[in-house]
């Protein structure tokens, strides 16, 4: 579930890295819930993809993620059955991009490549 989107996102004052023109950062605050009957690993770096209206794919950036306050960063790791984790990630996109959708692929080791993955229309 998407809790909020900040686009463009400006990192806090004093952050070591900042977006450079013609790119901007997008901050996505989301919640991942495990609906399986066993604990499942979830990694923000491998399990999320953002696409724009022209089907360009963007991944989460470690540099942007490291600019987030520690208590806001999405916590990687196992999610127990029925449990949720909430946090933020940062994605670098061209500032002219629009029409975003977020694909939540699920963990690469437990992914069913024959089924559809959840796609969230970002409404932007």
Image (tube, helix red, strand yellow):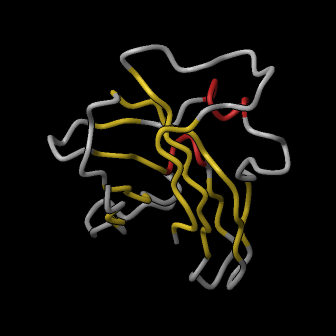
Left or right, 42 with respect to 118, comes to right
Question: Residue 34's spot in the image, x, y percent?
Answer: 61, 76
- In the figure, is residue 29 to the left or right of 53? right
Which of these two is toward me, 33 or 6?
Answer: 6
What residue sits 23% from the left and 36% below the top?
Answer: 56
Could you say where residue 74 lies in the image, as x and y percent from the top left? 70, 52
Q: How many marks?
A: 0
Residue furthest out toward the right: 71
Residue at 57% from the left image edge and 68% from the top image edge: 3
Q: Is 9 displayed left or right of 71 in the figure? A: left
Q: Residue at x 36, y 66 (%)?
A: 120
Q: In this view, does 8 lie to the left or right of 98?
A: right
Tell me where residue 93 sits by quadrant. top left
Q: In which quarter of the image is the C terminus?
A: bottom left
Query: Percent x, y for residue 9?
Result: 56, 38
Give the answer, above or below, for where 108 lies relative to 67.
below
Q: Where is residue 62 in the image (x, y as percent from the top left)?
A: 62, 28
- Check the image and report above or below for 43 versus 1: above
Residue at the farthest left position:
54
Can you tell which quarter of the image residue 69 is in?
A: top right
Q: In which quarter of the view is residue 4 placed? A: bottom right
Which is nearer the eye, 78 or 8? 8
Height in image: 99 above or below 123? above
The residue lying at 27 percent from left, 68 percent from top is 116
Q: Tell me if residue 65 comes above or below residue 98 in the rendering.
A: above
């Amino acid at each position: 579930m998407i809790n909020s989107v900040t686009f463009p996102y400006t990192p806090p004052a004093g952050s070591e890295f900042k977006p450079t023109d013609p790119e901007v950062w997008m901050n996505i605050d989301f919640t991942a819930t495990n609906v399986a009957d066993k604990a499942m690993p979830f990694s923000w770096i491998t399990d999320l993809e953002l696409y724009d209206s022209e089907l360009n794919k963007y991944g989460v950036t470690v540099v942007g993620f490291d600019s987030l306050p520690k208590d806001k960063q999405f916590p990687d790791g196992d999610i127990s059955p029925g449990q949720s984790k909430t946090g933020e990630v940062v994605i670098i996109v061209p500032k002219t991009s629009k029409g975003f959708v977020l694909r939540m692929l699920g963990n690469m080791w437990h992914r069913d490549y024959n089924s559809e993955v959840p796609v969230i229309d970002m409404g932007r």
